């Protein structure tokens, strides 16, 4: 919280800053400030006449910025004091502005505003993936976490480099080279495998709760995908359509030998890394005590990539969601997806849209009535290779031959270490395609080839031209290893490993002052792709054409149209709106029993799709907080009590009039990350709005002031608690700003549902079921009524969220200005300073001349000095 004491310090700084400017506005501050804060009065405990001014001190400069902003906002002098003439105020503010800008520019002239910074974990992973065409190789999970400054992890102050980082980079480099280098003359033969859910080996058996399934009907097999495993118990040539039912842990499956199961297609476990084509057929139905009837509508199934640990028998395997897929009623729907799989990975299956249910009793599944999801089959084909050796290998070794290593021909030479191809885990039925002996890259002129290969690889990896001197250092490294007895491939591997762990690769290397074309290309690619420039962008940089306005605009459009721009969408929103914290806490199961993984992933998909809509349709900044459409799927439409939407895929949906949705603030993902899993509070939500949407982050709370803890018993409301909290003078000034946005957002609960009353575990009225699944028990009650009314600091009042939305959306320039600042911090790796404000204002003004859309703001940003200078 900004204390009056800090403000007084600022006024004193202004009054005594004769060394900082030729004509300081001392008369202005003497007339309006020092009467209360001189050596005798010392209001706030400060003597304004004894404070120095040091523009080289960052804390001192921060105080100058605060006093400028408080005076400019009309907050100081206080409203109960005489107001100074507008002309005098303008003169004083200009003096402060000019001094701050002059001091900042002088400091930046030496080595730029952006410090040398390394790649973040995400940037590193994406760069390596794109460099070697390994799109699914996981790397960042094994790297130390990055810090955050100014709300993002891209600032140099958040990106230190410790011995732990270096050790992990060495490990990652070895892992990358292990996967990228081809170890055989021909690609491993792709397997085509069909996995039936009826197969006793299709799922690994675990004893869960009473899960059951039932054989529904026969289906002839696909001749291209032979049945997998033992089907002796089936009619010859038959393939089963199996029904999977709900139970206490996951969907159920009929198993003649064992009724318990775990949802992994463990009959297939990847042996070779690469792209695989996965095909499945899904449908849904209503099970009515042994009879199949049409379902209530489209259900959802989830496929996940599961990394099997240990021998694969135990549970708790790490997994990532591959996607959600429609299972329409009765009529099957075929789904095809091509994805990257690493060794020891398999595919998991679940009926995402179905709530947990139990099938106990003597009839078990036969006595169950309710919806279910069926899977006809699951086909796997891969690894798929368009060319061999793969692209990553070619970027390391070009067209050099891969030959069988013969120790007789190379006495005293050490071959590369190879791990034998082997079947993965005890349950995998797909077999390896081994080659005999050790195969390695061969060169008749090793140093000459090393020089050529490194001349091609290093500029691509370092993202700019590399001098002959630097290249020679790496060639000398190859020569040393050859002399020590390594074969050519191993010697080159040493050089590539060194390059991947060098500062030239790990850091953003930019010249001071205006960026050259190569640095500008990197700024663009790491903004929109979170990765290195591609060949098109690099060619523009090499030709010196990138800095032309028409070229920059065309590249923005091209890069945003590329699938890699989804990284920008997810990473930017993950940090700006804190969506990375979506799973930081789980909602209380008693208060919010309808919450599940499918809903949470739908929340994220909604916010990602909405931001994409803003950028693609070039919508203006007021759409950040209010719109007449939302991006929904069937699960979210039901959650929001909106007209039905069919299917798992998120799409743009027009909202009915009067709907309290539209804009980021009414989206469940944002509402969840600003709650604690049990209750909501206006304080963190209000602070979130001020910081992330208005660019006015509140100061930390004073020491020894306890936090406000909402009462889940339903005895008192959070508003009643805050009324008492604001009686503390040290808290009141900030709560006047924070609380109103937070009060408006009280219309939404922990998981983004709209409410008129709080949920309670204590006193209250019985809660109606509403759209909560009939298989979900309701243990909460309806407590006190929600009061979402409030008043902004300027006196404008609102009765609820919709009116607050309108007030916030009315100041489009404020929203646009903050959005540009967020883009700039993310894209440049540094905070937006006081001297940058004029540039930000110019960007918004230029964008407004062309409609003021979100994409137009990006056009103007990348052409500004703010973006194009270090």
Image (cartoon, rainbow, N blue to C red):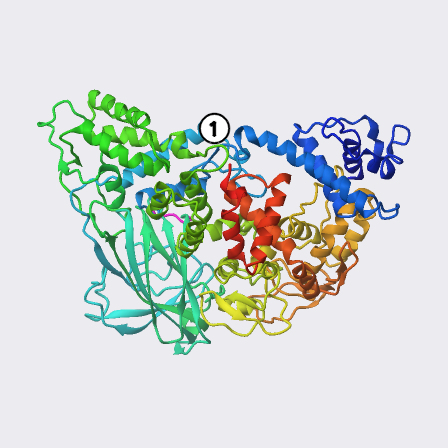
The magenta-colored residue range is 312-316
Furthest-front residue in this view: 22
Q: Dot 1 surroundings within 10 Å: few (below 14), some, or many (20 or more)? A: few
Rendering quarter of residue 338: bottom left
In terms of secondary structure, where does tag 1 sit?
Answer: loop
The part of the image, by quadrant, that contains residue 143 is top left
Percent of width and height locating residue 128: 36, 41
Residue at the extreme left of the image, as rendered: 408
Q: Return the x and y of residue 574 as percentages of the image width and height.
A: 52, 50
Q: Determine whether 387 is above or below 248 in the image.
A: above
Q: Residue at x 82, y 44 (%)?
A: 728
Magenta stretch, main secondary structure class: loop
> Would you say residue 761 is visible in this rendering?
no
From the viewer's side, name the closer residue of 230 and 659. Answer: 659
> Image point 72% across, 36% down: which residue?
64
Asked whether residue 694 is in view, the answer is yes
Of residue 851 and residue 655, the one placed in the foreground of this image is 851
| In the foreground, 670 or 374 | 670
Name which quarter of the figure residue 557 lies in. bottom left
Total marks placed: 1
Q: Say whether residue 244 is magenta.
A: no
Is 314 inside the magenta-drawn segment? yes
Position of 132 relative to 275 (above/below)? above
- From the image, tell me which residue sits under label 1: 162
Q: Position of residue 425 (x, y in %)?
A: 29, 46
Q: Which corner quadrant holds the N terminus?
A: top right
Relative horizontal placement of residue 772, taking residue 799 as reference (left or right): left
Q: For this view, does 743 lie left or right of residue 540?
A: right
Q: Position of residue 37 (x, y in %)?
A: 86, 33
Q: Residue furthest right?
A: 40
């Amino acid at each position: 919280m900004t204390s009056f004491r800090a403000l007084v310090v600022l006024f004193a700084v202004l009054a005594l800053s004769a060394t900082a400017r030729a004509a300081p506005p001392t008369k202005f501050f003497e007339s309006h400030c020092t009467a209360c804060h001189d050596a005798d009065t010392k209001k706030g405990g400060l003597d304004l006449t004894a404070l120095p001014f040091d523009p080289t001190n960052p804390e001192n400069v921060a105080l100058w910025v605060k006093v400028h902003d408080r005076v400019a906002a009309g907050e100081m002098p206080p409203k109960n004091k005489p107001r100074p003439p507008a002309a005098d105020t303008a003169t004083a503010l200009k003096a402060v502005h000019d001094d701050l800008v002059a001091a900042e520019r002088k400091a930046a002239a030496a080595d730029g505003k952006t410090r040398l910074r390394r790649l973040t974990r995400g940037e590193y992973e994406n760069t390596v993936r794109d460099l070697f065409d390994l799109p699914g190789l996981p790397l960042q999970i094994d790297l130390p976490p990055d810090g955050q400054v100014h709300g993002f992890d891209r600032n140099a102050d958040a990106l230190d480099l410790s011995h732990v980082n270096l050790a992990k980079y060495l490990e990652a480099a070895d892992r990358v080279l292990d996967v990228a280098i081809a170890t055989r003359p021909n690609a491993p033969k792709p397997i085509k495998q069909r996995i039936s859910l009826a197969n006793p080996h299709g799922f690994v058996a675990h004893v869960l709760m009473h899960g059951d399934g039932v054989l529904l009907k026969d289906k002839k097999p696909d001749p291209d995908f032979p049945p997998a495993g033992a089907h002796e118990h089936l009619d010859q040539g038959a393939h089963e359509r199996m029904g999977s039912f709900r139970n206490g842990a996951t969907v159920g499956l009929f198993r003649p030998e064992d009724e318990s199961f775990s949802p992994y297609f463990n009959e297939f476990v990847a042996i070779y890394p690469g792209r695989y084509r996965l095909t499945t057929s899904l449908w849904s139905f209503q099970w009515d005590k042994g009879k199949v009837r049409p379902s209530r509508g489209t259900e959802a199934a989830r496929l996940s990539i599961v990394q099997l640990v240990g021998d694969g028998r135990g549970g708790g395997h790490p997994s990532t969601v591959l996607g959600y897929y429609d299972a329409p009623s009765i009529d099957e729907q075929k789904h095809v997806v091509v994805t990257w799989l690493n060794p020891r990975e398999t595919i998991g299956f679940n009926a995402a849209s179905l709530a947990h249910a139990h099938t106990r009793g003597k009839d078990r599944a036969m006595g169950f009535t309710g919806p279910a999801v069926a899977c006809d089959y699951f086909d796997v084909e891969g690894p798929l290779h368009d060319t061999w050796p793969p692209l990553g290998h070619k970027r390391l070794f070009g067209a050099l031959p891969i030959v069988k290593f013969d120790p007789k021909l190379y006495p005293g030479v050490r071959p590369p270490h190879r791990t034998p191809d082997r079947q993965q885990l005890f349950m995998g039925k797909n077999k390896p395609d081994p080659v005999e002996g050790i195969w390695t890259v061969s060169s008749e002129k090793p140093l000459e080839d090393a020089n050529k290969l490194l001349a091609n690889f290093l500029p691509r990896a370092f993202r700019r031209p590399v001098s002959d001197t630097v290249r020679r250092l790496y060639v000398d490294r190859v020569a040393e290893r050859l002399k020590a007895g390594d074969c050519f491939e191993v010697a080159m591997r040493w050089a590539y490993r060194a390059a991947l762990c060098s500062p030239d690769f790990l850091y953003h290397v930019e010249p001071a002052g205006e960026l050259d074309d190569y640095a500008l290309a990197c700024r663009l690619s790491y903004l929109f792709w979170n990765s290195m420039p591609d060949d098109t962008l690099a060619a523009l940089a090499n030709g010196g054409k990138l800095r032309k306005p028409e070229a920059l605009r065309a590249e923005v459009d091209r890069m945003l149209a590329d699938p890699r721009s989804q990284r920008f969408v997810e990473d930017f929103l993950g940090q700006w709106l804190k969506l990375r914290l979506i799973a930081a806490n789980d909602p209380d199961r008693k208060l919010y029993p309808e919450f599940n993984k499918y809903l949470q992933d739908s929340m994220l998909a909604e916010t990602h799709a909405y931001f994409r809509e803003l950028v693609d349709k070039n919508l203006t900044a007021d759409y950040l907080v209010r719109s007449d459409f939302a991006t929904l799927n069937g699960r979210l439409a039901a959650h929001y009590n909106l007209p039905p939407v069919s299917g798992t895929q998120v799409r743009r949906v027009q909202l009915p009039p009067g709907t309290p949705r539209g804009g980021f603030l009414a989206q469940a993902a944002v509402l969840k990350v600003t709650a604690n899993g049990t209750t909501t509070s206006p304080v963190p939500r209000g602070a979130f709005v001020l910081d992330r949407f208005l660019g006015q982050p509140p100061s930390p709370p004073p020491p020894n002031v306890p936090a406000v803890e909402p009462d889940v018993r339903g005895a008192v409301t959070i508003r009643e608690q805050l009324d008492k909290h604001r009686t503390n003078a040290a808290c009141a000034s900030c709560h006047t700003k924070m609380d109103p946005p937070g009060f408006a957002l009280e219309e939404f609960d922990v998981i983004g549902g709209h409410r008129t009353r709080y949920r309670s575990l204590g006193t209250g009225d019985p809660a109606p079921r509403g759209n909560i699944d009939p298989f979900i028990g309701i243990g909460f009650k309806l407590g006190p009524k929600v009061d979402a009314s409030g008043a902004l600091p300027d006196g404008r009042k609102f009765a609820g969220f919709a009116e607050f939305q309108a007030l916030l959306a009315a100041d489009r320039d404020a929203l646009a200005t903050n959005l540009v600042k967020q883009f700039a911090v993310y894209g440049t790796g540094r905070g937006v300073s006081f001297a940058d404000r004029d540039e930000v204002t110019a960007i918004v003004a230029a964008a407004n001349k062309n409609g003021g859309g979100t994409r137009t703001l990006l056009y103007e940003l990348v052409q500004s000095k703010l973006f194009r200078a270090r």
